[in-house]
Image (cartoon, rainbow, N blue to C red):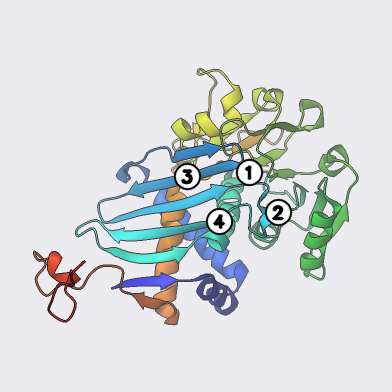
Amino acid sequence: MTTILTPQDVTRIVQRVGLPDLMRRMVGYLEADYLRWAEFDKTPRVAAHSPEGVIELMPIADDRLYSFKYVNGHPKNHRFGLPTVMAFGVLADVATGAPVLLSELTLTTAMRTAATSVMVAKHLARPDSRVMALIGNGAQSEFQALAFHHLLGIHELRLYDIDAAATAKLVGHLKGTPGLTLTLCNSIAEAVRGADIVTTVTADKSNATILTPEMIEPGMHVNGVGGDCPGKTELHRGVLEMARVVCEFEPQSRIEGDMQQMPADFAVTEFWRVLSGELAGRESPEQVTVFDSVGFALEDFSALRLLHDVSRQLCLGAPLKLIPDLDDPKDLFGELRLSGQMQAA
């Protein structure tokens, strides 16, 4: 039987485990799976683009489990009372193909994206990083803010968004968080000045230039989250040229990330090589580092594994009869019988 987890179930998981501890566990699952990089059958996500946005499928598998995520990105969805990003996912047993878990991934994607940002920043940001600029204060901003505060020790957030209401929403949610100072800024340049880490998480599906080279200071780590599809960027190419650039899955990142601006021979490093110790992360205190984050299927695989394990521990979720329960597995047509008789058309 398949288990289904609704948004209410995931909310209950967060309430019972606590958001910081859940994201801390998420980082652990992510690291465990990234360290098994070679064991996965990987492919760039499959995208269907339209003038209003994109719908994507993100599949991945190892020899035991298969997962996929359905996810969209529609920046103007607020007009219809819908989130910019909506997602669900499936975790299935490779041996039989049976779906084990069907889960919401809208809330979960925000948590796994923040956990991924922190996981990478542990290796790329300076260990003494305490101040983060957060450019883009929309739906994912609180998750990024709290992950960096609780898991990486950020104690000041410098906030900027072209929509003042978005910043007010963020401040309303985070004010009173112990040990966290919120500083409102009037421009991107003001927010970035003096920051150790700069996180960009904007929603517009366009070739934007959120950060330019003159804004970048020695030793900064840039966590570029918003550039995640063809035709959408956040970083001036000069920022990439001056930095050590790390990505998730290079074949996908070259299509969707800020790296889409760069020539094919532009040097990048896949994160698993850093995590495994094969390559260094930050090489000096003055080095500028960039995580060109687009979101990769392995991260959803990890998130679904975590949800499956935690939901079983907490006895959350409901059974879903998604697959016919056949008396004879070779007799599929028999499932259509009504009271033992076929109904005339």
Q: Where's residue 191, x and y in %? A: 84, 44
| Residue under label 2 | 79
Query: Which mark lies nearer to you, 1 or 3?
Result: 3
Front in this rendered view, residue 303 or 32:
303
Q: Is residue 309 above or below residue 88?
A: below
Total tally of numbered discs in the picture? 4
Query: Which mark lies nearer to you, 4 or 2?
Result: 2
Q: Where's residue 64, x and y in %? A: 26, 56
Front in this rendered view, residue 292 or 32:
292
Neighbor class of circle 4 (other Cα within 10 Å; few <14, some 14-19, many 20+) is some
Q: Could you tell me how far apart the alpha carbons at marks 2 and 3 are, in whole angstroms?
A: 21 Å
Looking at the rendered structure, the kind of residue marked 2 is: Arg
Q: Earlier in the sequence, mark 4 or mark 3?
A: 3
* Disc on res. 56: 3
Q: Could you tell me how far apart the alpha carbons at marks 4 and 2 are, in whole angstroms?
A: 15 Å
Q: Where's residue 333, x and y in %? A: 14, 65
Q: Residue at x 43, y 57 (%)?
A: 302
